[in-house]
Amino acid sequence: MPNRGVGWRGPRLGDLREDEARQMRACGYRASTRWSSGRSPILGKPIGMLLLARDATVTYCHSHTENLPSIVRGADTVVAAVGRGRFVRGDWLKQGAVVIDAGYDGNVGDVDFDEAVGIASLLTRVPGGVGPMTIAVLLDQTIVAAQSHVRNAARGSMGS
C-alpha cells in the first residue's frame, strides 16, 4: 500500500496557479471545493476557479450545505477549509479521492486523517501540508512585489 499520509505526492498544489501543460490536469474530474460558511475568497473561491480553468466540474459547498456528505462523496478532489477539526469524515470520501486539507483547528485539520488515510489516494497532512505551501507562495509574491517596486523606482529616477 502506498504511503498516503506524508503530504502531497505528485503535482504540487502551488503548480495549479501556473499555466503549464506539464502540470496537473483536472480535466474529466469532478471536484468538490468546500470551505467555511464564511465562503472565504482566500481559498475556496480561488481554488475552485483554478480547477474550473482546468475544465473540472466544481461544486462549491459550505458547512451548512444540505446532504453535504453525499455531495463530497461524489467528488474526485476535495479541498477542505472549514476550520473545524475532523469535520470531514472518512465515509464522506470516494475511494481514491484526492483530499487537500487546508483547514486548521488546534493541531488537526478539517479532515479526519485517520479515517481518510485508507480511502484517499492522496492526502495532505495537517500540520505540514498546505501551510508551508501558503508561506512559500506569500514569500514568492513578496519578492515579485519588491522586484516590481525596485524596477518602477529605477525607471522614475532615470526620467528626472
Image (spheres, rainbow, N blue to C red):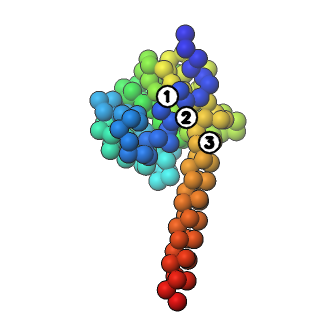
Picture quadrant of residue 26: top left
Residue 6 left/right relative to 62:
right
- Identified at 47% across, 32% down, the residue is 11
Residue that carries the numbered disc 2 in the rendered image: 101
Residue 32 visible in image: no
- Decide: few, some or many residues near mark 2? Use Cα within 10 Å; few <14, some 14-19, many ≥20: many
Mark positioned earlier in the residue sequence (2 or 3): 2
Tags 2 and 3 in contact by the CB under 8 Å rule? no
> Of helix, strand and loop, which one carries label 3?
helix
Residue that carries the numbered disc 1 in the rendered image: 10
- Identified at 49% across, 28% down, the residue is 10
| Residue 146 position in % (x across, y down) | 58, 65
| Residue 45 position in % (x across, y down) | 42, 49
- Identified at 49% across, 47% down, the residue is 43
- Decide: few, some or many residues near mark 1? Use Cα within 10 Å; few <14, some 14-19, many ≥20: few
Residue that carries the numbered disc 3 in the rendered image: 131
Residue 110 left/right relative to 120:
right
Instruction: Name the kind of residue labelled 2 in the image.
Output: Asp
